Amino acid sequence: MSKVRYPSFRTVLEKGGPVRVAGAHNALGGVLAQQAGFEAVWSSSLEVSAARCLPDASILTMTEYLESAVHMQRALAIPVVADCDTGYGGTMNVAHMVREFEDNGITAVCMEDKLFPKMNSFVGEGQSLLDTPAFAAKVSTAKAVQSTEDFFVIARTEALISGLGVDEALTRCHAYCDAGADAVLIHSKAPTNAQVLEFLEAWDGRRPVVVVPTTYPDWHVDEATRAGVSVIIYANQGLRAIVSSLRKTFEAIYQTGDSTQVEDLIVPVGEIFELQHLKEWQKLDA
Amino acid sequence: MSKVRYPSFRTVLEKGGPVRVAGAHNALGGVLAQQAGFEAVWSSSLEVSAARCLPDASILTMTEYLESAVHMQRALAIPVVADCDTGYGGTMNVAHMVREFEDNGITAVCMEDKLFPKMNSFVGEGQSLLDTPAFAAKVSTAKAVQSTEDFFVIARTEALISGLGVDEALTRCHAYCDAGADAVLIHSKAPTNAQVLEFLEAWDGRRPVVVVPTTYPDWHVDEATRAGVSVIIYANQGLRAIVSSLRKTFEAIYQTGDSTQVEDLIVPVGEIFELQHLKEWQKLDA
Amino acid sequence: MSKVRYPSFRTVLEKGGPVRVAGAHNALGGVLAQQAGFEAVWSSSLEVSAARCLPDASILTMTEYLESAVHMQRALAIPVVADCDTGYGGTMNVAHMVREFEDNGITAVCMEDKLFPKMNSFVGEGQSLLDTPAFAAKVSTAKAVQSTEDFFVIARTEALISGLGVDEALTRCHAYCDAGADAVLIHSKAPTNAQVLEFLEAWDGRRPVVVVPTTYPDWHVDEATRAGVSVIIYANQGLRAIVSSLRKTFEAIYQTGDSTQVEDLIVPVGEIFELQHLKEWQKLDA
Amino acid sequence: MSKVRYPSFRTVLEKGGPVRVAGAHNALGGVLAQQAGFEAVWSSSLEVSAARCLPDASILTMTEYLESAVHMQRALAIPVVADCDTGYGGTMNVAHMVREFEDNGITAVCMEDKLFPKMNSFVGEGQSLLDTPAFAAKVSTAKAVQSTEDFFVIARTEALISGLGVDEALTRCHAYCDAGADAVLIHSKAPTNAQVLEFLEAWDGRRPVVVVPTTYPDWHVDEATRAGVSVIIYANQGLRAIVSSLRKTFEAIYQTGDSTQVEDLIVPVGEIFELQHLKEWQKLDA
């Protein structure tokens, strides 16, 4: 409970080496990711909306996504990268978003070039994108209103998700870098990383590249790094593990009629207290 | 996403049969409990505070506990029983609490007779209790300000937790029933349910009894029912399963360098979409 | 502090007689409007955003507007009509909006046919509107997802604001009624009520008409009623009075060097206590 | 809308000269105080609770008071001094409070030595105080957990409010300074400033003194400064002006049947737009 301090995402990235980021939806998930070694935490809009049992479709508001990101960051010694969807509307919304996240201590945000309201990238095909200059304007607005040098803006293109191909993805990412993006995120939900590799081969390295290997889980961090990736986001595996685990736990208790059987699968209460930093807090009352 | 409607906790209880309640800290956990068969969900203050990595010690505010309970209830077809700690202060705070929870659609709350700020019951020994008349006044205030007949107030005694013995627990529970409590919760963290059984034998049955078998997980629902228990709360097994599962998942990804190994342990993304009721939502745009 | 109960906006409207609604941004303003005789309170997005010193341009989120509306409603014995801008996005956002406002006890909402993100109607000229079928779809979605019969949806056209003329306003309002709107709001910022009168003459009375006479303040309630108006919203006079009054008060204190001079212009502290229902609350501790 | 930056309260105080602070409950009030010349804004718990029509009696939570203070600070170029009542509970609550307020950009907080839950100082007589060492422990905890040197903790004694006399007030204030308080606030609701003057004469000047001349409004800033006061809080005149002004405005509209009569008493809509920084925001879309 001693004041947790954290470096900015930019600082972490500049240390070199691949930066691995784990998706989470609350402080507890973020802290467990940090304990496992991850260098940053992704405040995933899929996870945050799923925790509410609502679609990842701009249904929850910036207020709610911001709150989740801030709750994570306050508990962490590593930076949060906030998944900010489309920037929550138009240019003014992006300006407000950057101010709110930055003022609340978030050091990196990611915006994508889909239309508002957005739909999760794994749903359907051929989602419409904002035209390139309009999204570039969002990026330049974000950069213009940030108040510290450190603040980091990732521009994410959904060109591959929308079936527009690698050339379109490259064109967009160049435009976003021209507009001031600090990194680009190239997202693909193809069953392999082939298109992403094609993108990486053609990329001139002017800005770091971020990937999200949800559908090509076998892409090893070392291979990705050699291919030119700087940041890898494991965006939702934690959430999917939780669903699996809660299902089993609740079913076992309900069906067997007591909780004996699950005792070996769950951590003791004392481990919860440790995650709550209870001993440090209790010293305040000594 | 079709409007979820739910019966009040009182209605569920009056159906007869043991009512089993699973602890959760967000809507997702509540829905998975519901799917497993549980009849109600406990918005556990231990879980909600642990999700923030803060102690279960009246650090989070009523606003935050209320928000968690409401987020759960909105996603559920079964009632939430809100763990309201001490009622968040004095008599006026209890009145405000009842109004806020009831106005937000919560149909049952539970208050305990510890002092504010409270400390989690599994921490230390001999925690101080509010004197009996003062807590009874809280109970009668809660009952006086509720605006629907259905609203249900559970009075929880920590007499056994505080080492005061079964007689004190009985005296207190009688006083709380005299003050209008709709049920009593007898909490014990002894390694067996012996003291709770002693309480149940002496209890005259004027109001239903609620138990929380965290430290005696082998107490079968049928045995408990025969012993006179009406409601069993499995208060934190879900949280403890999550910690166990997230640890393994994050460590496996970080240590192996990719997420292949965890693919078999986590649900597919499509299952997340189902929990988000995505198809029903999409029909709105058709 | 005794439980404040309120009729739905539909109930108030069905009583007959003109319904006058005062704009507010917090519970205090709402209560003072109620004390003055108003039949309902308008949770004005201009007021709520101005209270934050942010533009009325979809910068604040649904979460924040909802919270303001709910804080008002909880303190009132008359209904709140929630100014919901464009419905906060697309069709799914409208569905979520209706559920959230209705679940929180709001009985009437108003949506307008501008594009998201919107800009305040008094800013600039020729703001773009959503096409009629798309906005009608929002209206029908709103009506389809409401869970009580009482819930009331006002469809507001900005046709006159956008310079599209009375015919377009009529066409749109007819379409919105076909889609299920419970009332229509015809907004105009012309220096006189001429266009609104023209609209009223041509209106067939199938649904009640709501007006907002900000720029034609001399339109008497009796005249408006005779012209066919059912509801009059005095949307922002309260806010504008507050700015005027606070300016004078703060300047007087700062410039004179003490607060003697303002004593006659401000209510005594005891009047604040009455607005807080202090005596009723204190009875709880007796 | 250009990024508003503000000095810390400590910086403002160290500039010398009397620091005058105006009470407010939202950003708008804060900005109007700033425009009038005030050097800081008091996020008054009386004002914030009154805006909700709820008593100033620890009914609202830290979450709600924090949100109000932060909304003010984000809109201001002068610092907010947060009225933090008793620190919202015990020592741990104080630690959490300091972290939350400091992390959110608040640079000064004020805690008082009443018991939690507190009652507003103008209500009744002889309110009980926390014993001196216990409150001193709160002060030292606050100072121990702050993470920047700048953060400023004001210890407020209610000794005079509780009828305990000037000597007790002095003893307490010395103990609070020994515990690390950066300033002391001596509150009195007597009809004159006599007791406060007696306190000031006996005070050794080791730390700045803050006063709140609500009941002795004729105490001129220059006299107070000569008497040894460093900070004067005009805690609630703004709120009381608002009530007076809203009453008149709403009554005039309702009783006359239109809003003509109030037009001269309220600012034009354009002035609201200026307070919203509309033009600066619109440049983002240019």
Image (tube, coloured by chain):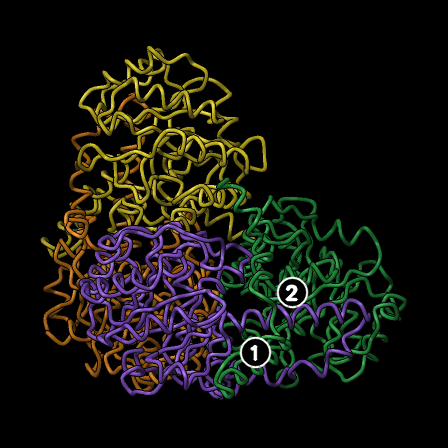
Chain colours: A green, B purple, C orange, D yellow
Q: Tell me residue D101's x, y (percent).
A: 48, 43
Front tag of 2 and 1: 1
Q: Which disc, if any, is residue D195?
A: none
Q: Does the rendering let one see residue C73? A: no
The amino acid on which the numbered mark 1 sits, given as a three-letter code, is: Leu
Which chain does the numbered disc 1 sit on?
A: A
Crowding at dot 2, Cα within 10 Å, few <14 / some 14-19 / many 20+, comes out as many
Q: In the image, what residue occupies the spot 24% across and 29% down?
A: D162
SS at mark 2 in the image: helix
Q: Which residue is mark 1?
A: A246
Q: Nearer the viewer, residue B151 or A195?
A: B151
Q: Quadrant of residue C270?
A: top left
Q: Tell me residue A85's x, y (percent).
A: 60, 67
Crowding at dot 1, Cα within 10 Å, few <14 / some 14-19 / many 20+, comes out as many
The amino acid on which the numbered mark 2 sits, given as a three-letter code, is: Phe
| Vertical arrangement, residue D126 with respect to residue B31, above or below | above
Q: Quadrant of residue B133?
A: bottom left
Q: Tell me residue C149's x, y (percent).
A: 25, 83
* For marks 2 and 1 on the same chain, the one whose residue lies earlier in the sequence: 2
Q: Tell me residue B269's x, y (percent).
A: 64, 82
